[in-house]
Image (cartoon, rainbow, N blue to C red):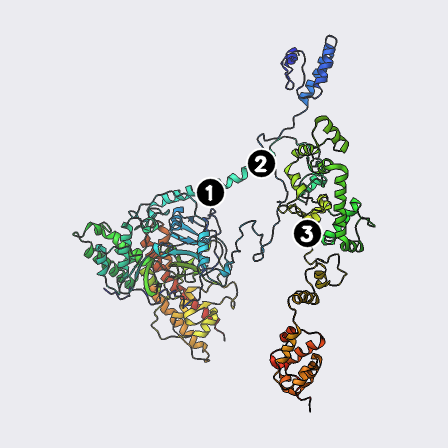
Amino acid sequence: MASVSATWFYQDRGLRGIASADAFVTGKPYSKNFQSSFLGSFPAGILQVRFHLNNSQRRALLLPCIKCEKEDESFKEVSVERPPYYSYMDSTSGQLEPASGARASIPGEEYWPEGTASRVRAARAPEPTGKSLGSPSYGKNPGSRRKYKTSVAASESSNVSLESSDPLESESSVDTTEEPNAFSSDYVVYETEPEQEETGYGLDKKLGLPHPFIDPKVKKPIENTLSIEEQWWNWKKPEKEQWSRWQRRRPDSETVFLKAMAETGQVKIYGEHPTLTETSLYRARRHLFKEERLRAEQERLERIGPIAYYSEWVKAWKRDTSREAVQKHFEETGEDENTQLIEMFCHQTDREYRVMMGTDVRIPRDPLAMRMKEDQIKQIWGGDPVYPTVNYIQDPDEVIDFRGPDFHEPTPSMLAYLKEHGKIISREELEKTLANEKTEELEMTDMDEAMARAVDIGEDDDEGEDSDVEVEEEAGEKITRNWSVLKSTPELQKSKEKPKKENPLSLEEAIDDSENLTDFLLDFEEDD
Amino acid sequence: MASSLPLHHPTHCFISNPKLKSFHHGCSPRPSYSFATDIQNHVKPIRATTETPPYPIYQSTQVEESLSELEPADPDFYKIGYVRSMRAYGIDFKEGPDGFGVYAAKDVEPLRRARVIMEIPLELMLTISQKLPWMFFPDIIPVGHPIFDIINSTNPQTDWDLRLACLLLYAFDRENNFWQLYGDFLPSAEECTSLLLATEDDLLELQDAKLASAMREQQHRALEFWEKNWHSGVPLKIKRLAPDPERFIWAVGIAQSRCINMQLRIGALVQDSNMLIPYADMLNHSFQPNCFFHWRFKDRMLEVMINAGQRIKKGDPMTVDYLRGQKNDMFMQRYGFSSSVNPWDVIEFRSNARIHLDSFLSVFNISGLPEEYYHNSRLSNDGDTFVDGAVIAAARTIPTWSDGDVPPIPSMERKAVKELQEECQQMLAEFPTTSEEDQKVLDSMPEARRTLEAVIKYRLHRKLFIEKAIQALEIYQERILF
């Protein structure tokens, strides 16, 4: 027994030092406990332990190690899982389509060109096997490789025939010897417990039924993922199940703006989203709202001071920006407001700067638009053009409403507008102005009028001395005598009518009005 | 040198011209050509007799002999051909004491189309066209070779076998030629049954003077040819082809017995040619053949095809009709074998007695046209095995009369029958030996020379045939309906 105990070694934990005293069956899971209990009760319990050990030793010998009959058998692991791709049937041949590089199926024998069938048959013919006994004589001895030689050597040939038949007989005997081996072993085969059947995912995987790639029980969520809100690509699922994405609320720039306005408190809308009425009201008055906002901004700037105001765009500036703090700072350091402002702007990043300034300083940016939330901006103006967001999709059939705030007003008259702004003046005014200019220059004497009357040819001397009015009236009547001239020259008629309206006409004006001197030929036939 | 029996190829050549027969190419193949490992198959008892083309299948009048002494041939036999793109489908080459034979490796159902069992390319053959200008396929003879002159000197009409023999001998000498390998499987001089190699004694044993003289002439002719062209002053190139006359005569015998005459179409040219075809000449002869030759001109292959509608069992010998419609002496002269059931055999009757043809045919249930008499087994009882080729030959050779619907007068018939029988008996009596004696002689010398064996068999068959004719007449006499 002692020898037995001495030779037993540990295989686990390397506690070989105690090998001599303890004899443990290797691999027993409770060996450690054994050891501890053993050590504790060493002197007293040796006998007992040894006894115990004897039993265990015997048990170790008695319990047969169930081994395979053949030692070197390695079981090939074969899974019946279906391949992870789809397989299709080829339309022409009905066979399984190859996975890649499919060529058209080869037609059957009926469609082969002539001679192909015989070539195929010749190619398919199996090669002859067999070893020849003789060797060729290359034309020297014809008939040398025949088996049945002449009758003279008939005895030899019969020997040959016997020999050749022997190997054939031995072949047949080989088959019979293999069978008894299978039953000659005297191992008893124990039936082990049947393996636990797999269920659920394991079963699906084994049988090749559709299954997720990862066992859902073992599955862990991926670490270090951003929340939906943090993701800039924003793969947000819609709130409620919708049949199509076109059913969602289509972002309208006005709607979004109105909503943003409602959120900032500038406008009150009834519910969460503005209704059509509210949107149309907004559309009518959006310029007002913008002015309001700009005014509010100004107000704010004045109220809280520039440092506090601009600190909105300087994220890195954490200090107190109220007026009191600035005042205090000024008192402490002597830096005035501008200096402090400059100091603050030193902490501004260029992005913030760009946001603050915009691209064009001349365009006053709407402060609401500047302060809108990311998703709201995206709804109106879209997101990153390189990585576009999902929400930027616009309805291609949308009719964009360009109507402005004075949509309900009629088309304003440009004339009135221009007149209002003094861009144009009316013709009367123009003439008035011109007339004012002209009457300054021209002041004719009566003499000239008389001289003008004197230019008369001579027929109507008496009437020429009358008043001009009469002359003119008669001239009007007289001219009716020369009706053909009058009719053919309509401007004569017109030019005559004009000076009639305005009674006091100076000589110069009269000369200017007249076509030629014939205009002064007035009233010739009034005597009769 | 023309002998009385014309040696030139008979008029009925194997014309396997696609026009005449409607067999198509490209049958579905028999993929398994296997050397039958079981020689103990139920092969029918064939005394495949002599070699040169080992020959026929007897009808079951023969006693069933114990099974085969047939063994599969040397595997190299097929291998040398396979390597050179010759193919054999579903057949085995087997060798028996009487020589090579081709046997079916598996059962064949009767099909609509003829099935190819062998295809042999042109390159393996030795072919000479029959008419001038002689063309050789494949063209192995170089232009300056003196053998060319020898061949040129032959008589175009009659000396086809001499040309073939020269070609064969040259092929043996030519390096890398297939015939150097294949020649090892040809029958050697001792095994060859061709009567050219027969001695004088053998010829005397023939008991047929005409045939004997014919053979003597043949031998003489061959010898002369050899002496003329292989004299001592001939260059070594020629001399080593046939150093002695025996070799040359053996070659002539091979050429005569293994030659196949076919009409070939090569390219656009159609010509009759004499061909020595390697594997196809191992086919035996039968009067009811199951194979035929077909020339596939597309890739210049000779196909050996099974007759359409032919049912073949495993182990059946594949046979071809060598000569169509020739008597035994023609077969003997050319091939060196004979058959007792040659349906074309002829007995020359000298008397005027005639029997009624129609009743004779109906007694034995022979139907068909005179060219194609066959035993109609549907009419007869199944157990009737008397009718064989000999009876058919008798039907052809026995003088008959047939005059429309005129019925035979029984008494006259009987008289005629008696007369004919007497004449046959007379003929039998003329022979020095009887058939039993011949049989005894055959049995007594199992190790006789091949030619002697063939000769004795020849006369035996002749007698058997005459006896059969007598028997047939007897039966006819009995069964004449009154």
Cβ–Cβ under 8 Å for marks 3 and 2:
no
Foreground mark, 3 or 2? 3
Which residue does the numbered mark 2 point to in the structure image? A180
Query: Are labels 1 and 3 on one chain?
Result: yes
Q: What is the secondary structure assignment of the residue under circle 2? A: helix
Q: What is the secondary structure assignment of the residue under circle 1? A: helix
Which residue does the numbered mark 3 point to in the structure image? A393
Percent coordinates x, y for residue B139 in the rendering: 29, 56
Is residue B28 visible to us here? yes
Front-most of residues A168 and A250? A250
Which residue does the numbered mark 1 point to in the structure image? A168
Looking at the rendered structure, the number of numbered marks drawn on it comes to: 3
Marks 1 and 3, the one that precedes in the sequence: 1
Q: Which chain carries label 1?
A: A
Q: What is the secondary structure assignment of the residue under circle 3? A: loop
Foreground mark, 1 or 3? 3
Cβ–Cβ under 8 Å for marks 1 and 3:
no
